[in-house]
Amino acid sequence: MKSPQEIRTIGDARLREAEMLLAKSECDGAFYLAGYAVELYFKAKICELLRLDDFYAKYAPNSVLSKAYMTHNLDGLLLLSGLLGMVKK
């Protein structure tokens, strides 16, 4: 899981898995995996904005920068991805 395309490919897989779970009325699992897919899509966008060819290797695991990006907080990732202005509330 490194380049934006690799991150998106994994996001696509999680989204397909979420759709399969939803088709079986497994809503909790579907919701979880769909959220993870969104997280990955935001991280791919951040990677593109920062022109990083390897999102996960650029920052040491305990650095200040990694804490900002290595999160599961969708609101924070939405902001960092530059897509906040596209979301209607």
Image (spheres, helix red, strand yellow):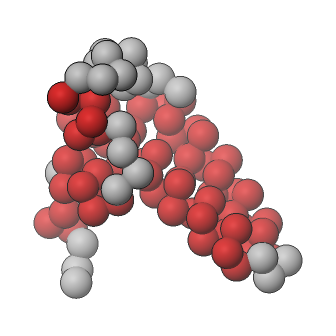
**Which of the two residues, 83 or 76, is positioned nearer the viewer here?**
76
Residue at 21 percent of width and 67 percent of height: 86
Q: Is residue 70 left or right of residue 1?
A: left
Q: Residue furthest front?
A: 62
Whether residue 53 is visible: no
How many marks the image carries: the answer is 0
Q: Is residue 60 left or right of residue 82?
A: right
**Which of the two residues, 69 or 4, is positioned nearer the viewer here?**
69
Q: Quadrant of residue 58?
A: top left
Q: Position of residue 21 (x, y in %)?
A: 78, 69
Q: Position of residue 89 (x, y in %)?
A: 22, 84
Residue at 31 percent of width and 16 percent of height: 60
Picture layout, residue 40 above or below residue 89:
above
Residue at 79 percent of width and 66 percent of height: 20
Q: Quadrant of residue 57?
A: top left
Residue at 46 percent of width and 46 percent of height: 40
